[in-house]
Amino acid sequence: MSPLTVFLCFLSFMGYNKSYIYIKRPYQEEDSLREHDMRNTLNTAAVMLLCMFSLFFIRPDLPYITAFLCAVIICCADRFLENDRGFGLFCILFFIAGIPDPDFTLFFPAAAYGLFRRKLYPVLAAGILIFFISSGTGRNALSPLLLCLELFGFLTAFLLSSETSSRECLEEQLRRTQDDSTERDLLLTEKNRSIQERQDYEIYTATLRERNRIAREIHDNVGHLLSRSILLVGAAKAVSRDASLAPTLDSLDATLNSAMDSIRASVHDLRDEAVNLDEAVRSLTESFTFCPVDYVYDAGRYVPRDVKYAFISIVKEALSNIMRHSSATKVSLTIREHPALYQLCVEDNGTQIRESKGGMGLTNMRDRVEKLNGNIHFFTENGFKILVTIPKRRQDDETDTDR
């Protein structure tokens, strides 16, 4: 095999190595650690191949083969040994072996690649020093081409290690950037969801306030006008002496009363639907100054009307009983919505005698809950606790106002 053929093989190998590093297909996904190991293996093989170019200048005898096998051991240690100090010790022994046997210096660049990659510069400096000291002895030391080849091997090891380190740093930065981008996307998604929920809640609250305003306007304006018209028609019927007008006045009176009933029903429906359970209970807790209230609301916006009014009435009665019959210093109030039921819990740490279970307040609570097919329990251990559970209705049983 001619030297030109070996040199062309070396260039082809280096070209394959660079293509493996830089020309990866976009759809090829490999494990990062495995890719780095493969890249380091190819770089080490390239440096070893460059060191074997020394065969063009010397004959492979037993010392040369021994140096070659020791270099292979050093390359394997670089591949599998994770401890930098252990690898540095192996390299020092390898460099020391080059003092009596200059054939070892021919493979110093193979060890230099691992030292460059691991940044063990003191050991590397010792190896280069031993290389120049040994270059003055031995049968191969005086060959200028061989010396240039070894220096080129050191340079190649440095360039490959620098290139690999730079690429690994860039890949690490890319992974961190991707992780940060993914984290930011998750945070933005969560923030957008919170903003959307907040916006929906504000729209829902504004809708309830507008219903209240419409109900108030109808009651104050249209309702008063109809009441006045009914009174006028009644007065006209009382003072009228014309019998022919009596049917007309009666029909007008019935029509106005029917309209008044419709207006009154519409106003009540609007007001009932406009009640926000969370805001209503929160206003009760804010106006309760007897002791602090720990309030938790964990229910949806669309709670049936009868459940809302039952909970509001029970909370009012419970807070009133705490003020009158308790020495509590803290109240815990929780409203939760479960898949099959609504739950209300009012608990305090009072120790004084409470209203008996036959009292009017607790009886009214029990009546309200039983009308909704719910359950109510009273506990007197470590204070006083009211636990209310109301099952959800089936969709077929719900009215339009409950939805």
Image (cartoon, grey):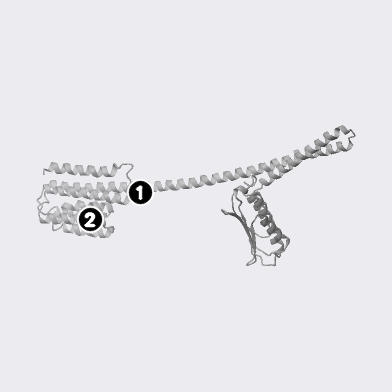
Residue 93: x, y in percent?
A: 20, 60
Q: Is residue 315 visible?
A: no
Viewer-nearest residue: 161 or 365? 365
Image quarter of the N terminus: top left
Crowd tier of the residue under label 1, counting other residues whose Cα lies within 10 Å: few below 14, some 14–19, many 20 or above? few
Q: Amino acid at mark 2?
A: Cys
Give the number of the disc on residue 71: none
Residue 397: x, y in percent?
A: 62, 49
**How many badges with numbers are in the image?**
2
Q: Indicate which disc, 2 or 1, sits on the residue closer to the N terminus.
A: 2
Q: Secondary structure at mark 1?
A: helix
Side of 109 relative to 169 (left or right): left
Question: What's the residue at 66%, 41% (across, down)?
Answer: 210
Question: What's the residue at 66%, 60% (across, down)?
Answer: 291
Which residue carries the number 2 mark? 76
Distance from Cα at disc 2 to Cα at disc 1: 25 Å
Residue 383: x, y in percent?
A: 64, 65
Q: Amino acid at mark 1?
A: Glu
Which residue carries the number 1 mark? 172
Viewer-nearest residue: 232 or 69? 232
Residue 376: x, y in percent?
A: 65, 60
Q: Quadrant of residue 290?
A: bottom right
